[in-house]
Image (spheres, helix red, strand yellow):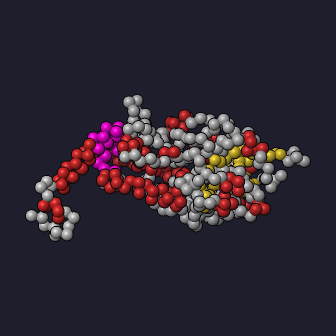
Amino acid sequence: MCALPDTSIWAWESRALINVRYILILTVSLVLSGMGVVYAQLAGSSKAAGLEQCVEPTAFMRKNHMEVLLHQRDKTTREGIRTPDHSLVECVSCHAGRDDDGNFVAVNAKDQFCAGCHEKVAVNIDCFQCHATRPDVEARGAEYPTFAGSPWRVENMYCLSAN
Amino acid sequence: MSDNQDKGREDRRTFFAQVSAGAALLALAPGFRLIDLAVGKNDDEPASPDVRWGMFVDTTRCAEGCTDCVDACNTEHGLHGFDRPQTDAQWIRKLDLEDDQTGQTWSLPMMCQHCESPPCVDVCPTGASFVRDDGIVLVDKHTCIGCRYCMMACPYKARSFIHEDLTDQRPHSPRGKGTVESCNFCVHRVDGNRLPACVEACSDAGHKALVFGDLNDAESTVSKRLSTMQTTQVRDDLGLNTAVRYHGV
């Protein structure tokens, strides 16, 4: 019945009364389809929701997006390589959803694209302590507070050769 | 019939003439910006060691009280204060100087001087402070532990430490609590063949006190200015070979 030799890890299975492999496959597919529904709910309003797949096949991205980002991080910061495909800025601009008023919602907000899965699998990332969580909208420039400057620094600038 | 054909030809001629004129205008507009950034770089190319970015500051054109460069920097990088002047982040600031004896005054912008041999890089214990191949001095905030040795080492007080949690950063300028930061010559703009925000703002406002370009390219505007005008390196006694040079101080 089983074509694999008896040394295979699956060999015991052919003798089992209930085929464990089929149960495993069934469970995994149920979980994955469940996740698919969650994804659809989370990211329904994002640009990514309307696309066939991410910059790499979906299965690859689910498993390896952190490696891809880590690699690109050093390429960009250290060497200035700014290809868009694996850039965090592009992830955010494509995956950020919108609220009912059409405004972007932070990707790390509860139930949004990043946080939705990371909370589920108890992963604590620190990307968004520094990185923007929403796409930049040119009009948002006005939202940034104005800045009065630091007189202390000016007074302490004593070392110009001109003096 | 023949008249119609002629008219058709005429329309086509007008159309092509208009299209060519439009194309010439389009070519001119980006060309104007690219004069100083002749060394174009594609997204997939690393920064070139053949380039060294630098800036010429004409203090005789820099008006006292003008903060166009500072404002542009703050907007570009989303910098804002927490009403704590001693620690608020500052990438570029205006200095007003006066000679005690003669009463002569100067006004100039002060920021990271992008040294060839930067003290901040020497003292960094994690390698987070580094000089990119094209001469821009940067902080890799992924490896910065916030020890602030670089801030103490910098003779120009160019660096700031972020003390507060931040939100709503600009996508091209990640900033976060516990890391040190400073002027990065708007590296995201330079990589896209655009001028730094301060240079653009100064130029747009008509002051033209700042010139940015490749110091290694003898034909660049910045090199021509440096070769024909007197310039000063601030604290040249330290021998750091700064990429920012001041005229008129």
Identify whether A154 is placed above or below B42: above
- Residue B98 in magenta? no
Residue B34: quadrant of the picture: bottom right
Residue drawn at x 85%, y 48% as measured from the top left: B99
Residue ID at (54%, 34%): A143
Q: Is residue A42 magenta?
A: yes
Whether residue B219 appears in this view of the structure is: no
Residue B21 point in image, percent of width and height: 47, 49
Q: Which residues are magenta?
A: A35-54
Residue at position x 12%, y 55% in the image: A17
- Indicate left or right for A101 with B30 as reference: left
Q: Position of residue B43 (x, y in %)?
A: 47, 57
In the displayed structure, does residue A121 sit left or right of residue B242?
A: left
Looking at the picture, how far across and down is residue A27, in whole percent? 22, 48
Front-most of residues A17 and B227: A17
Outermost residue, left side: A1
